[in-house]
Amino acid sequence: MDEKQVSKVSRQLQEVIGEQRLDTLGRQTGYCEKKRLLTPFRMVLTLISGLGARPIQFLADLQRQFNALFGTDVAYKPFHNRLAKPSFPDFMEAVAKVVWRQWSDQILSARTQELFSEFKQVVIQDGSSFAVKDSLMHVLPGRFYKVSPAAVELHVSLDLLTGTPMNVNLTPDTESERANQPESASLAGSLYLADRGFFDTKKLAELDAVGGFFIVRASVSINPRIVTAHQEDGTPLPHLHGQKLKAIRFDQRGAPALDLMVEWGSKKNPVRHRLIMTWNLAHKQFQYLVTNLPKARYNPETIREGYRLRWQIELLFKEWKSYANLHAFNTGKSAIAKGLIWASLIAAALNRFMAHSTQLAAKVEISTQRAAMSAVHFVTPLMRALNSKCSGRIERAVDSAMRLLAVTARRAHPKRDRRSGRTSSGLMSLGVPA
């Protein structure tokens, strides 16, 4: 195990979720003005230890975790009251943002001169929603009222190369996804991947104007004009020029991809983009990928491969919901519901941070999902070590966690990943021998 990496991770843990940092954030957000037994530092360590290591069903489970972690006998009511403070979600959100900013090591990189090597970031945008207690319907209304009267949505911008969220917005499920996209200017020099819910020609034109690149799936209902058309092998199709997209007719079975230049709006002031059109056999409909990547460097197959990288954000959502207790707790207090959502994301961030750090320290490819499944064996010892404030003990806990993950959380099929997985599109895992 790389001792320098172990020491670095130990320092990062103490700097980000150490007592001084967390208690200061607690005061700044109004969560804690006086030094009490239930300090911000102790609350965060409890929530990480509880939510990040094992399934939690009740708030009382967290209260018991607090007492077990710190050797106290705090009753349920004062513990509940600390969670119910209106400033609790503000404090936890502030911690989450510090965590994502500080625990962000690059673990993927594009090979020099390979595809996607020219982008400083690959940003994946998506949202994930889930129901909360029905009594919160007036504060957190759901889109599907009859099924889930109350629901929230997490709008996430994921940096693929670090595997870390750049930004997360927590809103009622009724709030628009498009309104929670990153600012176009922040994506200059980056590649932006998004599903059809984010398709917006105005947004794509903004990205183009600031020097951003994109692959966005479009709705099957779009109907732009075709400016130029080619088959996947480059064969021109001049008979399609000037037609509307919906007017195309050909045998879908075994049909080649079409590489089109299309335009929306008036002919005097059109918005033009490249469109890759393929037939989706499973869903029996066309799939449209809209991009501004240059044809000379990125052929239709490469565009499709690039878009498949978007699946990494779905794996992140699965980790959150399956291994970090991101679910509806039985509470009608919006402060508790929101605060525990942020706490779940912090716990998940620690697991990812330890997985990525282990990859760099042990020089083996690590699965973040397997690391999350192993969290029950290392998260609580880490929190106990942080509470001791002993640097030597913290380093030993980090070293022990990494040694565990290097064995139990190795990626099962790294060679397969290079053929058809996340490293099949010119990307490579950093810190791992080629």
Image (cartoon, helix red, strand yellow):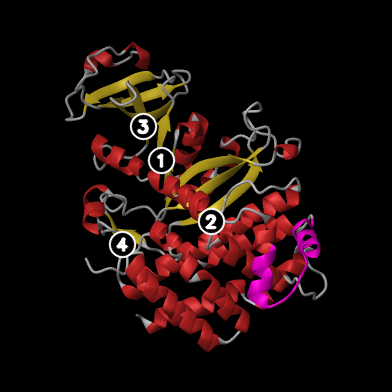
Question: Left or right: 422 with respect to 373?
Answer: left
Q: Residue 3 location in percent, x, y?
A: 39, 84
Mark nearest the camera among 4 and 2 is 2
Question: Which residue is labeled 2 in the image?
Answer: 324
Residue 414 seen in the figure:
yes
Q: Kindly identify the amino acid type of the residue bearing the numbered disc 4.
A: Ser
**Exactly how many numbered labels are in the figure?**
4
Residue 429 disc label: 4
Q: Residue 326 location in percent, x, y?
A: 57, 50
Q: Alpha carbon of mark 4 to alpha carbon of mark 3: how far? A: 27 Å
Residue sitting at 46 percent across and 78 percent down? Answer: 398
Which residue is nearer to you in this view: 259 or 289?
289
Give yes or no for residue 123 being in the magenta stretch. Answer: no
Question: Left or right: 416 with respect to 218?
Answer: left
**Quarter of the figure that contains the C terminus:** bottom left
Q: Alpha carbon of mark 2 to alpha carbon of mark 1: how far? A: 31 Å
